[in-house]
Amino acid sequence: MGWRTTLEDTANAMAAPGKGILAMDESHPTCKRRFDGIGVPCDEANRRAYRELLLTAPGCAEHLSGYILFDETIRQATADDTPFPALIAATGSLVGIKVDAGAAAMPLHPGEKATLGLDGLRERLNGYRELGARFAKWRAVITIGDGLPSAACIRANTQALAMYAAFCQEAGMVPIVEPEVLMDGDHDIDVCDAVTRATLRAQYAALAEQDVHLEGSVLKPSMVLSGKGCPQQASVAEVAERTLACLLSTVPAAVPGIFFLSGGQTAVRATEHLNAMNAGGDAPWRLSFSFGRALQEPALQAWAGEAANAAAAQRQLALRARLNGAATLGEYGAAMEEAA
Ligand code: 13P
């Protein structure tokens, strides 16, 4: 059963103690939103320069087991012509690739989205593997709202994720299964908890139906949080406790790693939540991070599109990588923010 061992080895390397994943796979529209925030044109040259800055930041690789790239990024190279995948491999980290085609408005279901991209997936995965990718990502979004999510939304998204995961494993790549429950809305934490449980239950039923080898897969969930607009915001301790309880009752222990997305939390709050979950220390899976914004935002602000700011931006990224690495071990403390 060689293919299973290969997948398990990759998944276990992703979940190495003290390490997490940098999500830097923003599609062009998402990248434009981030660059608009700092007044930088979202052209190919700027995207390449920014991604080179992230990938060459000193002091990051020891806290990052993998990097998730976008289709454009996996084909790019440094200014002195080192292909990005080779750069990542040289640090001992793993190359990941976003393979979904984005979340589209769901037909007949106003306010909900379904992630598309199964057409041609087998061929794309094989191509990415040739370029060096060893794991992949597919993100689905579940929206909470009046009467939402619908059963149709949960079913369509979790089934597509399961089929994607099967294609990944066929191609020898570890699937990151990402059913994100959005934090937008004024709902309280109980609602988020119930929706996350329903989503993850459906997710693991769908993965079982597709015969996905769980030991060679990882989960990228959202945390159980109060809605962004909810007047009553749950404490760090409550978020940690509710998220752990939710995962314990829905995610099989065979899954080697759970890598949270940050979803719009501040960088510091995301680190605090992750640390609180690891402080107890007895979860059956490794609990780590696969943050986009919570790793990149301070670096993006420091960069502001100026080559002269690159080193300062890299220090911000290295700081978040180090502190989140500590949080995967339950060893993060607020004093480490000031000491930096
Ligand atoms: P955020 O951490 O910014 O939510 O991004 C993670 C990610 O990769 C979303 O798909």
Image: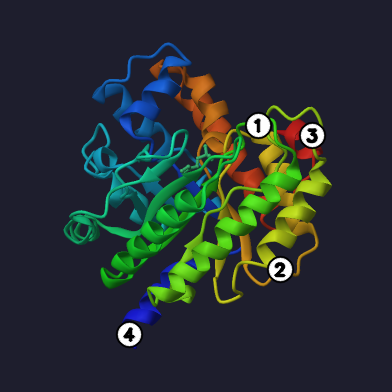
Residue 2: numbered disc: 4
**Which residue is drawn at the image coordinates 52% and 28% (left, top)?**
299
User: Which residue type does callout 1 highlight?
Assistant: Thr
* Residue at mark 2: C-beta within 8 A of ligand 1: no
- Res. 283 mark: 2
> In terms of depth relative to the viewer, which is nearer, 92 or 266?
266
Asked if ligand 1 lies within 8 A of label 3, the reply is no
Q: Residue at x 82, y 40 (%)?
A: 235
Q: Which residue is disc 3 drawn over?
A: 233
Label 2 is placed on what type of residue? Ala
- Alpha carbon of mark 1 to alpha carbon of mark 3: how far? 14 Å
Q: Is residue 56 visible?
A: no
The nearer-to-camera label among 1 and 3 is 3
Residue behind mark 1: 266
- The one of 61 and 40 positioned closer to us in this rendering: 40
User: Three-letter amino acid code at disc 3?
Assistant: Gln
Residue type marked 4: Gly
**How would you rate the neighbour count of disc 2 (Cα within 10 Å): few for under 14, some for 14-19, many for 20 or more?**
few
Which callout, 4 or 2, points at the residue further toward the start of the chain? 4
- Label located before the other in sequence (2 or 1): 1
Residue depicted at 39% across the width and 48% down the height: 68
Contact flag, marks 1 and 4 (Cβ < 8 Å): no
